[in-house]
Amino acid sequence: MAPPADGERFAVEVRSEGDVLVFTLTGELDHDTAEPLRDALTAAVDGGARRLLVDFSGLRFCDSTGLNVLLHSRLSLREEGGSIALAGLRPPVARMFRITGADGIFPVHPDVAHALAEPRHA
């Protein structure tokens, strides 16, 4: 996957891996850049996806806005019997999840391969 194009601070790419939708994030996720992720997650949930995996391995930064987008999607998915898991959190992002306690709310995997090997990330 390529880094965000020149001038872009954030990008999200969505692909299907069996029954799991994988959202690969690159750049910086914050108040000014969260809308594409919010839109992609909402479209997935509204479209009937029930297993989502967010790949953070290309993300350099995530603030509370990004966390709130994920928490909202998690609640929507739980209402529909679905789940959302995280993979590849780099140290600066992992620290924010640890400080807020969100790493105890979401299943967190070292990378996408490990997450996809799980029979069901819930």
Image (cartoon, rainbow, N blue to C red):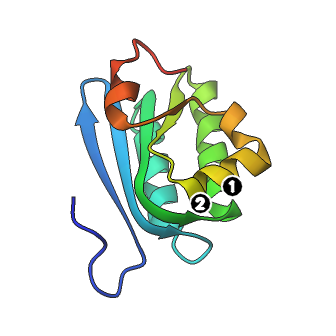
Callout 1–callout 2 Cβ contact below 8 Å? yes
Return the residue at label 1: 96
**Above-or-below relation of 78 to 55:** above
Instruction: Assess disc 2: are there few (<14), some (14-19) or many (≥20) residues with their C-alpha within 10 Å of its C-alpha.
Output: few
Question: Residue 81: percent from the left, percent from the top?
Answer: 56, 20
Q: Residue 115 carries which label?
A: none
Find residue 39 and report its horizontal and vertical position in percent. 46, 58
- Residue located 67% across and 53% down the image: 95
Q: Position of residue 22 (x, y in %)?
A: 34, 40
Residue 19 pos. (x, y %): 31, 24
Residue 7 figure quarter:
bottom left
Quadrant of the frame with the C terminus: top right
Vertical placement of residue 39 versus 15, above or below: below
Q: What residue type is labelled 2?
A: Pro
Q: What label does residue 92 carry, if any?
A: 2
User: Quick one: quadrant of the N terminus?
Assistant: bottom left
Mark 2: which secondary structure? Answer: helix
Q: What element carries label 1?
A: helix
Residue type at the position of mark 1: Met
Total marks in image: 2
